[in-house]
Amino acid sequence: MVSLSFSSAADDNWPDNERVAVSLSYDDALGSQLDNAVPQLNQYHFKGSFYLTLSSPVVPQRLDEWRSAAEHGHELGNHTISHACRADISDRDWVAPQNDLAKRSVVQMVDEVKLANDYLYAIDGKKSRTMMLPCGESQAKDGDYLPQVKDQFVAIKGFEAASLNAIMHMPAELSGAELIAYLQSAKNQQRKLVNIIFHGVGGDYLTISNDAHKELLDFLDQHRDDYWVDSYINIMQQFANH
Ligand SMILES: [Zn+2]
């Protein structure tokens, strides 16, 4: 069957219908996402969400390409400027001392998140967007910064209403078949929203190969009646308007 509509927002009945919303997102502003993920998404007319770490050198180096991705309907989301995470847990040798969330104050984080939104506005001209917390963490040295920033966003990934029965997966080194099996099991579990958090695609780190990514998109394209792929902001706006 050929799908007659590439449209996504046309699914007025979500979340009450049988479809599972799928948010494909790509964290940290990595070059392989522009090289590989964006062209593949465009080929299928799927919209993704790209959570830019604005200190990444790939942002200024390839500014026109990020802007072009936004013009194609992809979301540029807030992943802060410096990607502050807690350094006081295991396997965090990569967190630079100045980016240790355990040493940042709530006020510093609130300022940084606001500044990141201003920078993103300068890139894409949009005033609404969503956020992905770096490392999924928000405990600064003097409290939780999430409640102080959440009003700036349509949604924060991973903090959805319980009624969505949402699930989040951060795959690395998985095959296309494994990614597809994950989606199928989420559908069997009556999930209404699946968040897949990619990093590298065909390069960089926490990598999924180009072939695995393509296989996943091909499966989603073949099963548009079961899965609704869109940017996270579009999905969450649809939910808010429901
Ligand atoms: Zn990240």
Image (cartoon, rainbow, N blue to C red):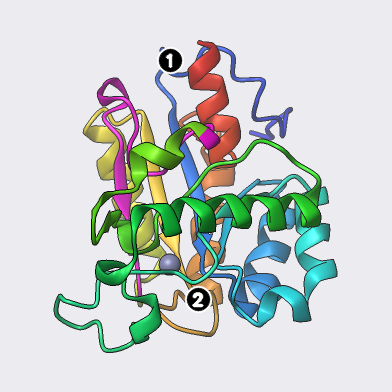
Q: Of the residues under marks 1 and 2, which one precedes in the sequence?
A: 1
Residue sitting nearer the eye, 111 or 63: 111
Residue 14 picture location, percent across and down = 48, 18
Q: Is residue 242 left or right of residue 160?
A: right
Quadrant of the image where one finds ligand 1: bottom left
Within 10 angstroms of label 2, few (less than 14), some, or many (20 or more) residues?
Answer: many
Check the image and report above or below for 237 versus 217: above
Q: Is residue 80 left or right of residue 193?
A: right
Tally of marks: 2
Ligand 1 has an atom within 8 Å of the beta carbon of the residue at disc 2: no
Q: Is residue 128 left or right of residue 197?
A: right
Q: Decide if residue 229 is in sight here.
A: no
Residue wearing tag 1 = 17
Within 10 angstroms of label 1, few (less than 14), some, or many (20 or more) residues?
Answer: few
The structure residue drawn at horizontal position 55% and vertical position 13%, both measured from the top left corner, is 241
Residue 240 picture location, percent across and down = 50, 18
Residue 102 picture location, percent across and down = 24, 68
The quadrant holding residue 135 is bottom left
Q: Main secondary structure of the magenta part?
A: loop
Residue wearing tag 2 = 200
Magenta segment range?
152-172
Instruction: For mark 1, give the secondary structure.
Output: loop
Instruction: For mark 2, give the secondary structure.
Output: loop
Q: Is residue 34 left or right of residue 158?
A: right
Residue 140 picture location, percent across and down = 28, 59
* Magenta-drawn stretch contains 198: no
The structure residue drawn at horizontal position 39% and vertical position 69%, both measured from the top left corner, is 84
* Magenta-drawn stretch contains 166: yes
Check the image and report above or below for 233 versus 218: above
Check the image and report above or below for 238 versus 186: above
Q: Amino acid at mark 1?
A: Asn
Residue sitting nearer the eye, 80 or 186: 80
